[in-house]
Amino acid sequence: MTISKRKYRGVAPFAATAIGLSLAACQPGGKGVTNETAETLAEVNAAMIDNNMVAEAPVETKSIIRPDIEPTPTPTPRPEPIERTIPFPAKGAQPDQVGLAVLDTLVTDPTFQLGGPITLWGHSDSSGSDAANLVSSRHRAEAVRDYLVKKGTSPDRITVIAMGEARPIAPNRKLDGSDDPEGRDKNRRVDIKVDLPRPDPDAAPAAEADAPRPPER
C-alpha cells in the first residue's frame, strides 16, 4: 500500500484517534467498545475514506522500447559476377596445384552455383608463333573447362575463347631485350568470368504471374 505525504498528513490525526480508541478498549478493566466509542471509530473510518487513505495498486511501469518498432534486418548482399585467373606453368597445358585450388574454391561459391554462364579466355606468352600460341591458349581454356565439368558443372554453361598472345598482362621481354620469365608466367593463364543467370524473356513477371485472375463468365 502506498500513501503520498500529503494524504498522510491529512489522515494522521484520524488514524491516531482510531488507534487510541482501540487501545483504550483493550486495556484491563476496560468496558469494551461503547456505543460512543464505536460511533467515533466509524467517523474516523469515514474520514480516512474521504481522504483517500486506501491501498493503491502498484503502477505498471511501461518499457521505453516500443513494441511496434523492430530492428531493421540487414539486407542480403546482391550477388555479383565472379572473376578469377588460373595460372599455368611453362609449356604446361594443365593447371598446377595453385590453379586447381582456385577452381575447387570457385565451384563452391554461392554465385557460381546459381547456374549463370561461364566464359573462359585462354592466354599464352609470346615464346612461339602466333598460330602455336593460339592453339596452346585454347588447350589451357579447355583444360579448365574439363575440370569444371568433372566437378559437376554443366558444359552448356561454358564458353571457351582462345586469345593466344594477343592480351598480355605483363611484358614478355625487358627493356634491354632480354627474356622476362616473371612476365611470361603471368601471361600464361586462363581468365574466368562467371555471370549471373540471365532472366528468361518468356517468363511472366512475378507480380503478373501471382495476380489473381478474374473469374470466367
Image (tube, rainbow, N blue to C red):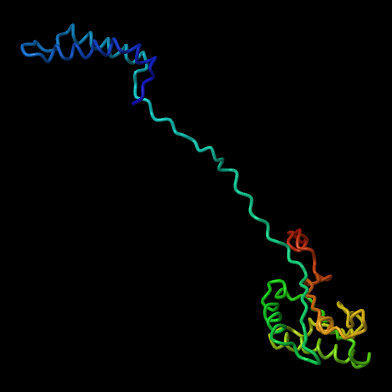
Q: Position of residue 19 (x, y in %)?
A: 21, 14
Residue toward you, 49 or 141 = 141
Q: Quadrant of residue 217?
A: bottom right
Residue displayed at 55% across by 43% down: 67
Residue 189 visible? The answer is no
Q: Position of residue 56 (x, y in %)?
A: 37, 25
**7, above or below 143, in the image:** above
The answer to whether 194 appears left or right of 62 in the picture is right
Residue sticking out furthest to the top: 36
Residue displayed at 92% across by 81% down: 176
**131, above or below 166, in the image:** below
Residue 71 visible? The answer is yes
Counting every numbered tag in the picture gives: 0
Residue toward you, 204 or 22 = 22
On-image quarter of the N terminus: top left
Residue displayed at 81% across by 84% down: 185
Residue toward you, 80 or 65 = 80
The answer to whether 211 appears left or right of 8 in the picture is right
Q: Position of residue 99 (x, y in %)?
A: 72, 83
Q: Position of residue 139 (x, y in %)?
A: 82, 91
Residue sticking out furthest to the front: 176
Residue displayed at 11% across by 12% down: 32
